[in-house]
Image (spheres, rainbow, N blue to C red):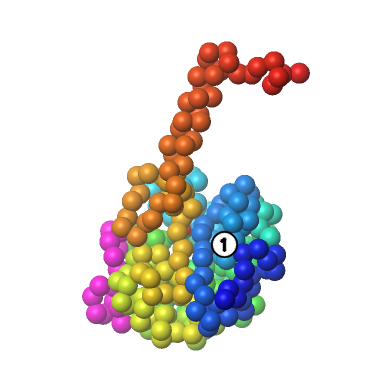
Amino acid sequence: MSVHSSSSVKRVTTHILQEMKDSGEKISMLTAYDFSMAKIVDSAGIDIVLVGDSASNVMAGHETTLPITLDQMIYHASSVVRAVKRAFIVVDIPFGHYQGNSSEALRSAIRIMKESGAHAVKVEGGSEIKESVSRILSAGVPVMGHLGLTPQSIYKFGTYTVRAKEEAEAKKLLEDAQMLEQCGCFAIVLEKIPAALAQKVAESVKIPVIGIGAGPDVDGQVLVMHDMLGITQEFKPRFLRQYADLQSIMTEAFQNYIKDVKDRKFPTKSESY
Ligand code: KIV
């Protein structure tokens, strides 16, 4: 029995997400960055919309998530907020806007909440950012953690390969997850880590654990919308299930339109005034 059916217009909250974990109902989460796509994914019944800093890749065409700015994240988040009626909306605080000190972290979180109307923020990292996480939470802003392959640290890792395969890194990840729960985070994303470790984390914390490349034994799953729709074709990690081939569908539509224009088949009389 679903704690929260997708036909309901009742807003998803942190409380409902916790109930979903407690009752064993899996949590669905996808990214969105603009009004039109956010409206479609919300109508489909998604539980959490993440305005991810992956916007830096899929919307702006950067190689990494590092260049996107706080103003740009607020612009994307505001567009999503105007579209979404049911899902819980989480926004990434971008690189460089929370790691420096906890006052800056709080200022960034408050700007996101006030200027976009989103419901929570997400930050990458564990013990290194504990003070920032606590400070944001003390202002009443819900925080989602993000551990494992944290893309804002890509130049430190030097590779997009699976994280926490070694015992020391796995131990730190588990401790970081427990620390984030103790601080008061409402959920944690685990990215690209061994499935067995993700299961251990999900069993050792009470808050929801959402995986991306973290196997099936967590409390929910998240994917980047453009990847699962097949709009981006060059990114095909093992964990990505492609649910559509929108690149082919869109290319065909564009080609048909171009041909109709060139052949003077569009517009017709009935499409004119
Ligand atoms: O920015 C993003 O899209 C993310 C997901 C990959 C979890 O952080």
Any part of residue 211 in sight: yes
Q: Quadrant of the N terminus?
A: bottom right
**231 relative position to 199: left or right:** right
Which residue is most to the top?
A: 264
Residue at point 48%, 53% (across, down):
225
For label 1, count other residues whose C-alpha is less than 10 Å away and answer few (under 14), some (14-19) or many (20+). Answer: some
**19 relative position to 62: left or right:** right
Nearer to me, 47 or 142? 47
**113 relative position to 192: left or right:** right
Residue 23: x and y in percent read 53, 81
Q: Amino acid at mark 1?
A: Ile
**219 relative position to 196: left or right:** right
Nearer to me, 8 or 201? 8
Residue at point 60%, 18% (across, down):
266
Nearer to me, 220 or 25? 25
Q: Quadrant of the C terminus?
A: top right
What residue is pinned by disc 1?
46
Residue 72: x and y in percent read 57, 51
Residue at point 62%, 68% (across, down):
5
Any part of residue 78 in sight: no
Span shown in magenta: 157-171
Is residue 160 located in the magenta-colored stretch of the structure? Answer: yes
* Image: 263 above or below 178: above
Which residue is most to the left?
A: 166
Q: Main secondary structure of the magenta part?
A: loop
Residue 18: x and y in percent read 56, 79
Which element is circle 1 on? loop
Is residue 270 located in the magenta-colored stretch of the structure? Answer: no
Answer yes or no: disc 1 within 8 Å of ligand 1: no
